[in-house]
Amino acid sequence: MTLFFQKLKNNALVSKIWESFLSVIPITISVSILYFVGLITDTSIGVFDLNAYLFFLLCSLIAIIGLGLFQLGVDKSMTRMGALVGETLARKKNMFLLVIMTFILGFLVTMAEPDLTVLANSVGLSNYLVIGSVSAGTALFLVIGVIRVLKKQSLKIMFLAFYALVFALVGVVNPSFLPLCFDSGGVSSGPVTVPFILAFGAGVAMSTNGKASGEDSFGFSALCSVGPILAVMVLALFMPEDALSPYEMAQADFTFGHLGNEFIECLYDVALAFGPLIVVFLIYNFFFLKLPWKSLLKILVGLVYGFVGLWLFLTAVNGGFFPTASIVGLSLVSRDLWIAVTVAGLFGLFAVLAEPAVHVLVKQIEEISDGAIKKWTVMVVLAIGNMAALIMAILRAYYVIEITYFVVVGYILIFVVMLFSPNIYTYIAFDSGAVASGPMASAFLLPFVIGFAYGFGLDINLYGFGVVGFIAMMPLLGVQLLGAYGNAKSKLLLRRVQKTIVEPDDDQIIHFSEAL
C-alpha cells in the first residue's frame, strides 16, 4: 500500500492536479464560509442558494482537473518547444528568421493564455481585438527581449525607458482604457507564456553565451509584460471615445444547460487558440528541428493535455467562477466597508499563497541569495502585496478614485527602490508580478471587484478593471525592498568586519557571522 501511494505521489498528472487543487481550494473554502455565515445575499443578478452553491462546487472540481491537465500539458509541450526553438533560432545566426519566428511564436503562445481569454470575455470590446492587441504587444517585446540578450543590453535601463513611455501615454489615453491597459500586462504573463518565454530566453542565451545567466532567466518575461500595456494604449489612441461599451452584468445562470453552452463555446475558443500554434510548430519542426517521431509525439501529447485542460478550466470559470465571484462582490456592497476590505484581503492572501509558481519563485530567491533572504520572508512579502492589491481595488471603487493615482505613485516608488536594489532582485521582482497574477486573479478576483463596483453603479471600465494590474505591480515593490535590505545588510556587515582589521597585513581570523 505504501508503494502504491509513493507511485501515485510521483505520478506527474496526480502531482499537477494536486497543485491545481491547492490553487483552487482556498477560494472554494472562502466562498463556502461566506455562504454558510450568510454574507452572500440575494442580488440583482441572481440568487446564490443551495443549488447555486453545489453548482459552484462542481465547477471548482472541473477547474481543478482542467488546471492540472493544463499545467501538465504546458510542462510537456510549451517549455520544451520554447527551449528547442529559442536555441535553434539563435544558432542559425539569421536575424530576419529569428525576429519573424520569435514574433509569430510569441503571438500564438499568448493567444493560448487562459488569463487573457477570461479578461477578453469580460471587456466591452471584440474578443479578437483585445486578444490580438495583447498578443502583438507580447510578441513584439519578446523580440526586443531576444535582441537584448544577444546585444547584452541593460534590462534596468530598458525598464526605465519603456515605463517612461507608458506614463507619457497615460496623460493622452482615454481614461476608460487605462485599467484595461494595466490588467493586460498582468494577464499576458500567465501559466502558458511564462514557461515558454523563460525556456525560449534560456535557449537563446545558451546558444550565444554557452549558459543562461540569472539575469536572462529572470528578466525575460518581465520585459514582455510591458508590451501589452503599450499595445492596448496605442489601440486606445485610435479608438473613439465611446469604444468601450457600458458593462452589463449578465444574469447568473447556475444550470447544467448553461454549463453545456459554455462547454461548446469554450471548445471553439480553445481550438482557435491552440490550432495555429500547433500548425506553426509542426511546420518549423519539418524544416528546422526535424525531431525524432517519439520526441515530437511527446510534445503533441502535451499539447493535447493542454488543450483539454484549458477547455475544462475556461468552462468552469465562465460557467461557475465568474458569476459566483460577481455575486460575492455585489453582496458586500450592503455590508460595512471593513467587511468588504477584510474579505478582499483574505481573497488576495489565499490566492497568492496557494499559487504553485509562487513557491517555485521563493525557493529560487533563497538559492540565489545563498540563504540571506529566506523563502518564507519572500512569501510574506508577496502575501502582503497581494492583500494590499485587493484592498486598493476595493477602496478605489468605494471612494471612486481614478487608477492613475495608484499606478503613478506605485511605479515612482518602484523605480526609486530600484536604485538601491541589486540587478538580480529587480529582474526577479518584475517576474514575480507575473507569478502573483496567476489563474485565480482573472478567474475570481477580477469578477469579485467588478461585482463590488457594479453594486455602486460605477463605470466598470473605470473602477472594476485594474485589480490584475495592481496584483502584478505590488511584488515589484516588495521584492526590490528585500533586495535593497539584503544589499544594505551586506554593506553593513562589510563595514563592521573592516573595523576589526587592525593592520593591512594583520593575521587574524574574522568570523563574519559574529560581525553583526
Image: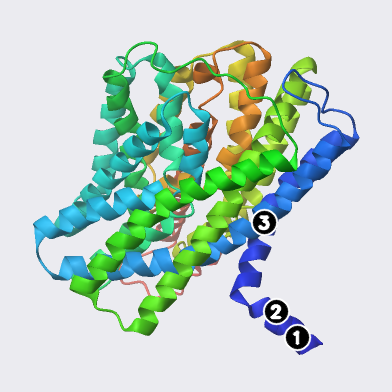
Q: Are marks 2 and 1 in contact (CB under 8 Å)?
A: yes
Q: CA distance from mark 3 to mark 1?
A: 23 Å
Real-space CA distance between mark 2 and mark 1, rounded to the nearest whole angstrom: 6 Å
Q: State the image coordinates of residue 444 (x, y, percent, origin top left).
A: 64, 38
Within 10 Å of the Cα at label 1, are there few (<14), some (14-19), or many (20+) other Cα atoms? few
- Taking the spot 22% from the left edge, 50% from the top edge, the residue there is 143
Residue 107 position, x and y percent, is: 31, 48
SS for dot 3: helix
Q: Position of residue 434 (x, y in %)?
A: 46, 46
Is 467 above or below relative to 435?
above
Q: Quadrant of the C terminus?
A: bottom right
Q: Quick one: 513 or 366, which is closer to the camera?
A: 366
Amino acid type at circle 1 is Phe
Mark 2 vs 3: CB contact within 8 A: no
Which amino acid, mark 3? Ile
Q: Residue at x 27, y 26 (%)?
A: 234
Is mark 3 in CB contact (under 8 Å) with mark 1? no
Looking at the rendering, which quadrant does residue 133 occupy?
A: top left
Residue 64: which disc? 3
Please give the name of the residue rendered at 18% of the width and 66% of the height, measured from the top-left corner.
90
* As drawn, 285 above or below 479: below
Q: Which residue is mark 1?
A: 4
Of residues 478 and 311, the one drawn nearer to the viewer in this rendering: 311
**481 with respect to 58 (left or right):** left
**Which color scheme does this rendered protein use?**
rainbow
Q: Quadrant of residue 259?
A: top right
Q: Mark 3 or mark 1: which comes first in sequence?
A: 1
Residue receiving disc 2: 8
Q: Is residue 383 visible?
A: no
User: Residue shown at 53%/37% (left/top)?
Assistant: 471
Q: Secondary structure at mark 2?
A: helix
The crowding category of the residue bearing disc 3, from other C-alpha atoms within 10 Å (few below 14, some 14 to 19, many at least 20), is many
